Structure formats: C-alpha cells, structure tokens
Image (cartoon, grey):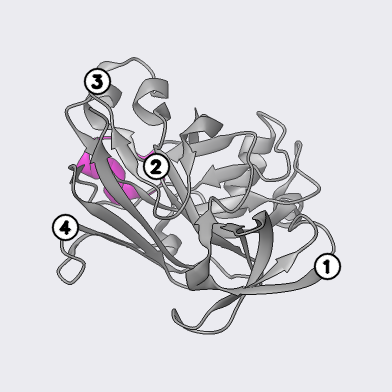
Amino acid sequence: MRFARFVHAGGVSFGVVEGDGSSGLTIAEIGSLPFEKVQFTGQRWALADVRLLAPIFSSKVIGVGRNYADHAAEFGNEVPKEPLIFIKPSTSVIGPNDAIRLPPQSQRVEEEAELAVVIGATGARRVDRAGAERAIFGYTIGNDVTARDLQRSDPQWTRAKGFDSFCPIGPWIVTDLDVSDLEIRCEVGRNPEAMEVRQIGRTKDMVFDVPTLVSYVSHVMTLLPGDIILTGTPAGVSELTAGDTCSIAIQGIGELRNPVVSLE
C-alpha cells in the first residue's frame, strides 16, 4: 500500500493512494494512523486536487554517511567499518514540492538522493536483524540536503545537515517492498523537459543493508514509530542553485520533487 499525508478542503488527513501509473491517481482518506488498522472514511479525492505533505511525523531522522563506496570515494574517504550515523532535526523535514531554502551561511549546498526507511508501530530497541525487519513499516524517498562547505569546515555535521528544509521526504510510504536492488536516480535542472542526471545508483551497492542499519541504530537509540533512517547516497552529488528543481526517483516508490530557492 501507499500511505500519504495530505491537505484538502477540510483539513489534513492520512490516506491510501490508489491507482496505477502517475496520472489518474486518487487518495482515499483513512481515519487512523498508517500504523493502525486501516479504516476508510469513504472520502476520496483526485491526487491532483490535494497537496501532499511529508508522509509521516518523525521524532528524529537518522542519517547514514558513506554507505555507498562510490560516494565515499568521490570525497576521498574510506568506507567506514561500521555505520556512520548522524541526526537531522525534525524541523529540517519538508514534503513534496516544498522549497529547499539555501541558507546565506553556505556557498555550496548539494543534494543526496536516498532510500528512507520508516519505523513502524512497535518501534525498535536493541533488535537483531530479524527484529529490525519486523520493525520496518515501509519506505519512502529522502533527500539529505547538505551544506558541503560547512560539512568540511565543521568538526561535526549538525549544522551542515540540519538547516530548515534540508530533509525533503515523500511523496508517500510504500509497504511490502523488496528494497534489496532498486534504482535510485536524481535529476536537477531548471527546465522540466531537460533535467540533468546527477546520480544513478542501486540499493544493492549499500555497504550496510537496511536490516543492519536498523539494528545498529536501535542499539544506540530507541527508534519510535514514524522515525526515519536515511540509508546513504550513491556518487554524483552536485551543487544546487536557486531556480533549480531537484527530482529524486526510486524504483517501486515514485518521485520526490522540490524547487530550490534562496533564503535571502
């Protein structure tokens, strides 16, 4: 199933996205959280008539650095011997079509296309691989936007990764998806008809796979329902400038698009 959070004339709701392809989709409102037993209210809208939000509330977003060997190599770094984790604040999260805002403190902001793991109702605390797999509710697309110059200059990554709008998530959460070998593709440009391919990778090339990451993080901090783990980015990250649109597509999930604007 595909679960989304959206704004409609009557307020904000969770819903199930119905239909195939990218056109003619509808969204059926549910009267519960996605983790709970799905109860349809009977209300439906054309997807084009609502505004999608980030699909879930998260107490925290955990990023994973250098989880693709080619991305580590493009910055001259070694592959880590265990997952390299960091936190992005919940205030950095935005949804589909929300603007990535370039802060004046940075002279170079880059995209990072990533598979995002959403933790389910049970949460996860000190779980093994099997427990990690049971704790996963579904998957969505994430963009670990990074102020690269600040990442290089600061002794830790909080500022570089934590600006408001630096964590686009969406467009929805997909459940029951095999993520062992999916294509991740990022395109950036100003003309929707002539976008430049920046990143192409496959999830099979992760250094640490999804169950390993969930288990590892759960031995550091308790994962709560709705928490998100960003699983790392393949090579090809590049500069975002005001006026760009960043489009990330992951096979089996969909597409996450965000415009880029200057904060000044």
Q: Which residue is mark 4?
A: 190
Which residue is rendered at x = 68% and y = 37% of the image? 218
User: Which residue does the numbered mark 2 point to in the structure image?
Assistant: 144
> Which residue is label 1 attached to?
39
Which residue is more in the foreground, 37 or 49? Answer: 49
- Look at the numbered disc 1 and give the secondary structure of its residue: loop
> CA gap, disc 4 to disc 1?
41 Å
Q: Which mark is residue 23?
A: none
Inspect the image, locate mark 2, and give the three-letter code of the amino acid beneath it: Asp
Q: Quickly name the residue at label 3.
A: 105
Q: Quadrant of residue 174?
A: bottom right
Cα distance between the residues tagged 1 and 3: 46 Å
> Which sits earlier in the primary sequence, circle 2 or circle 3?
3
The disc, 4 or 3, on the residue closer to the chain's N-terminal end is 3
- Amino acid at circle 3: Gln
Quadrant in the picture for residue 206: bottom left
Q: Identify residue type, mark 4.
A: Arg
